[in-house]
Image: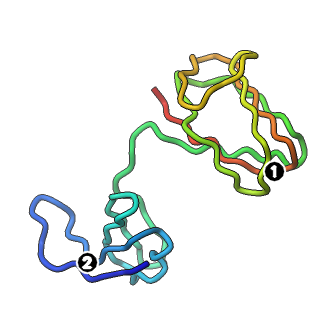
């Protein structure tokens, strides 16, 4: 883990002043600073109040956070053609099962707009579904 000073100007690019190894280093970056993160390969800006702003991001990628602490199953209709690329445990470490129109879903497969997505967890938890709009 490190934050190192960046030297020189990068023609045609945002001139960042620091380079971080991972997001865990971001707290060490001074406010009102552009910096490059090696892990996500993106330039970020830390504003005057210390909030990290995303200057560049992959278009069409979203995170759906599901609070499954009161119920263990959640159903939603796909608002667009999409795929779920991964599931991240936020609270607890449940076994997560995803069905697409009643069939077992494999991460990365295409889900048609209007399909019923049913997510079930084995224990009360909060999870993130990492979604890509196609």
Percent position (x, y) of residue 51?
49, 71
Q: In the shown orientation, is residue 3 left or right of residue 84?
A: left
Q: Residues within 10 Å of mark 2 (few under 14, many from 20)?
A: some
Image position of 43 with respect to 7: above or below: above
Residue at 25% of width from left, 77% of height from top? 17
Q: Secondary structure at mark 1?
A: strand
**Is 47 displayed left or right of 4 in the figure?**
right
| In the depicted structure, whether residue 42 falls above or below residue 99 | below
Position of residue 64 relative to residue 112, above or below, is: below
Residue 38 place in picture, x, y as percent: 34, 65
Left/right placement of residue 125 relative to residue 19 reads: right
Mark 1 Cα within 10 Å, few/some/many (few <14, many 20+)? many
The residue at the far left in this view is 11
Mark 2 / mark 1, whichever is N-terminal: 2
| Gap in angstroms between the C-alphas marked 2 and 1 | 39 Å
Are circles 2 and 1 on residues that touch, CB within 8 Å?
no
Q: Which percent across, then down, holds residue 128?
A: 65, 47
Q: Residue, x 63% and y 24% (percent of image)?
A: 78
Q: Nearer the viewer, residue 74 or 94?
A: 94
Q: Residue at x 66, y 24 (%)?
A: 105
Q: Which residue is mark 2?
A: 17
For residue 125, the mark is 1
Q: Position of residue 117 (x, y in %)?
A: 70, 25
Q: Quadrant of residue 8?
A: bottom left
């Amino acid at each position: 883990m490190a934050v190192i000073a960046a030297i020189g100007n990068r023609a045609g690019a945002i001139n960042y002043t620091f380079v971080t190894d991972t997001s865990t280093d971001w707290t060490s970056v001074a406010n009102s600073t552009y910096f490059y993160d090696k892990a996500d390969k993106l330039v970020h800006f830390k504003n005057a109040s210390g909030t990290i702003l995303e200057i560049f991001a992959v278009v069409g990628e979203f995170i759906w956070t599901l609070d499954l602490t009161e119920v263990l199953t959640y159903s939603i209709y796909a608002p667009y053609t999409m795929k779920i690329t991964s599931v991240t445990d936020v609270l607890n470490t449940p076994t997560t099962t995803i069905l697409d129109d009643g069939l077992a879903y494999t991460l990365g497969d295409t889900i048609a707009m209007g399909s019923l997505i049913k997510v079930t967890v084995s224990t009360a938890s909060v999870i993130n579904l990492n979604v890509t709009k196609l």
